[in-house]
Image (cartoon, rainbow, N blue to C red):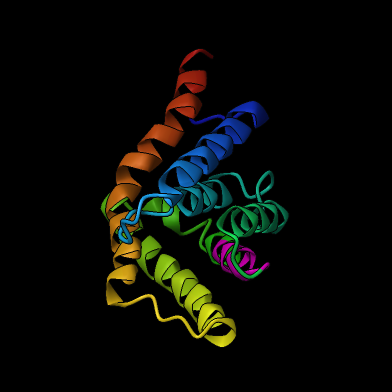
Amino acid sequence: MVRPASSLWILGTFAFSYVVMLATASVDILWLPDLLALTLIYWSVHQPQSVGMTIAFVCGILMDVANGSVLGQQALAYVTLSYLAFTLHRRLPWFDLIGQALHVLPMLLLAQILVMLVRLWFDGLWPGWIWFAQSVTGACLWPIWSMVLSLRRRESAANI
């Protein structure tokens, strides 16, 4: 049996993901996965009572400010991700990690499409097709990141 994670662990994983996103923002590699989005999906699925759309909105606003982009574009994408993850929070854990990654891929693609549409609407900037590789690398990273985030939950369950 897996116990719920502590609020401190959840906050720490979000802080770590945010710092990684800030550190990789200056690197011009378009296929790097959105670690904050993966963290948001994971916690929205595994602890929807603790992490929801408010956390997603705050994370999105923080990313918009950090990137200097249109205020609300990442927030819209993250809130959509949180909603989609919540709708799958009973179904997704039944799949193995590869099956979960196949569910996460369209969610990440939809979030990227929303960001792209806002970017096209306001700036007229087309990021190029390689930009969508970010969703594929995020889905490939999902099994590893999911295991890392669940370590603390399994560890606390083993101590009971």
Name the one closer to the observer, 118 or 94. 118
Please tell me which residue is depicted at 58% across the width and 28% down the height of the picture: 9
Which picture quadrant has residue 104?
bottom left
Say above or below: 50 vs 28.
above
Question: Residue 83: horizontal and vertical position, in percent?
Answer: 60, 65
Question: How many labels, in total?
Answer: 0
- Residue 72 point in image, percent of width and height: 67, 68
Relative to 32, 153 lies left or right: right
**Which is the main secondary structure of the residues drawn in magenta?**
helix
Determine the residue positioned at 51% across, 84% down: 120
Residue 145 lies, with reference to residue 76, above or below; the image says above
Q: Position of residue 91 (x, y in %)?
A: 46, 59
Question: Which residue is at 65% across, 56% downward?
Answer: 65
Q: Is residue 112 above or below residue 100?
A: below
Q: Nearer the viewer, residue 130 or 76?
A: 130
The answer to whether residue 4 is seen in the rendering is no
Magenta-tinted stretch: 71-81
Which quarter of the figure has residue 7? top right
- Tell me the residue at 52%/73% (across/down): 115
The answer to whether residue 142 is visible is yes
In the depicted view, which residue is nearer to us: 32 or 10? 32
Residue 75 quadrant = bottom right
Left or right of residue 110: residue 98: left
Residue that lies at the very extreme toward the right in this rendered image: 54
Q: Position of residue 51 (x, y in %)?
A: 65, 47
The extreme top residue here reads: 159
Question: Considering the image in quadrants, where does the C terminus appear?
Answer: top right
